[in-house]
Amino acid sequence: MARLFSFGAVIYLLIYAFEAAIRWGLFSVGMDNAILARDALIMVPLAILFVAQCFRLRVHPAFWVFAVIIALHGLIATLVFRTTIPAIYGAKMLVNVLFGFIAARQLLQPGRSILALFALVWLVCVVGVGLEKFVYSFPWTGLSTHVGGITVPMSVNWDIDSGIEKRAAGFMRSSISAAMLIPVLGLILACRQSNWMIRFLVLAITVGTVFLTTQKGSVLAIAGVSVALLVPMAWRWTMLTWECIGFTMLVIMMPIFTAGLLIAESGGVFSLSSFAMRITDTWPDAWRWINDNQLFPFGVGLGGIGGAQRFFAEDFMNPSDNLYVFLYGTFGVLGLVYLGWAIAQMLLLPRELRSAGTTAAAVLTFNIGYGVALSMLEDQVSALFIGASVGLLWQMRQFALARPWSDPFVGAGMRVPVPIVFGRPTKSGAMVELT
């Protein structure tokens, strides 16, 4: 079963890494909607595992928690908008979190063959961003497709399309996608390097490539996490912890305490123009939408803000561009509970397991940091790796507490934890087995 999840995750990531090229090919033969087939890579393994565990009368609690969250907040959205479309879209989006939660070890502590594939994908993505930035524009740049009855940009042309300020995406759908996948893969690779210089080189290339995408939120987040991964191991966990707390405070405070500020929206992509747009337009519009449509204290419900609005409120599609705004709009006050629970998995991890949880902590911290400027759960890969990072930390705590759910693929009749393996870096950074 774990191999099925590994296969689904790897193919899904490959499609994401080359999405622009794939969509261009499908567009060329009039098969735009075929891109939706990738969702089967997530849903089919989950369905098979759920059915198998039902027959064994031992269903992993993650399934039930996910079902309750979807049912509650989907009902809120249905009551608010009198349609099930937002709830369906929201469930489709968040199912990646569940998949990542269960396939946490396959994603964050892959075996040698998958790790080598991740390294190759990372390298190709880095080269792709460099080619688009300095050599030429790919043929899919600026094109759009029609998927599920809505217009979807294949590779956004943005406003600036030349010079150092050009937004580069390489083979991916947009610069946002590149600024999401490249850092995550870079962190997974860096955390597996025993040699400090190689780790530094991987992180430096990752930060430099993200800089070429012009996604400032991602640059700041990956730079901060990279510094934490380069300090001595004795300080590494503490630094990641404080960065995670600091990023979380920024995520919450930025859209609240900047309300009413006036900042000039000019100066190019390396200025404060994008943040100015969020402060003066995006976040205030999102708060107005939430205030006008929410069912307090539950927000507007699942799929009630963001991309789902293209289906039921096309004249007011607000990206929210902040993780907290998205969480509050979707889950209301409970959004803070969910965010706090996720961070608690990192803060409460037993000391003896922290070195093994470094990759998960780094990935979670990066996603929260990038969440200051982006509603991360709307990105398929971000949702996948947020689920994976939280899932691995949670599974490790279950392992420390001698509970059976440390293995999400556990079968019927098991009353004690099955033997599992966590990767743990030594003082030099090399990975050893922890059983």
Image: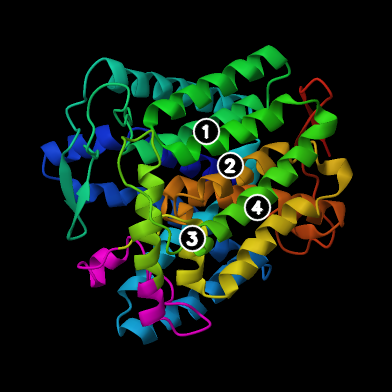
**Magenta-tinted stretch:** 288-317
Q: Image height check: is 413 above or below 369?
A: below
Closer to the eye: label 3 or 4: 3
Closer to the eye: label 4 or 2: 2
Whether tag 4 and tag 2 are in contact, CB under 8 A, the answer is: no
Going by the numbered disc 4, the residue's amino acid type is Val
Whether tag 2 and tag 3 are in contact, CB under 8 A, the answer is: no
Q: Which mark is residue 390?
A: 4
Residue under pointer 1: 183
Residue 180 falls left or right of residue 419: left
- Indicate which disc, 3 or 4, sits on the residue closer to the N terminus: 3
Whether tag 1 and tag 2 are in contact, CB under 8 A, the answer is: yes
Closer to the eye: label 4 or 1: 1
What x and y, as percent, mark residue 324?
52, 61
In what element is the residue under mark 4? helix
Q: Nearer the viewer, residue 65 or 345?
A: 345
What x and y, as percent, mark residue 8?
47, 44
In what element is the residue under mark 3? helix
- Indicate which disc, 1 or 2, sits on the residue closer to the N terminus: 1
Number of numbered discs overlaid on the protein picture: 4
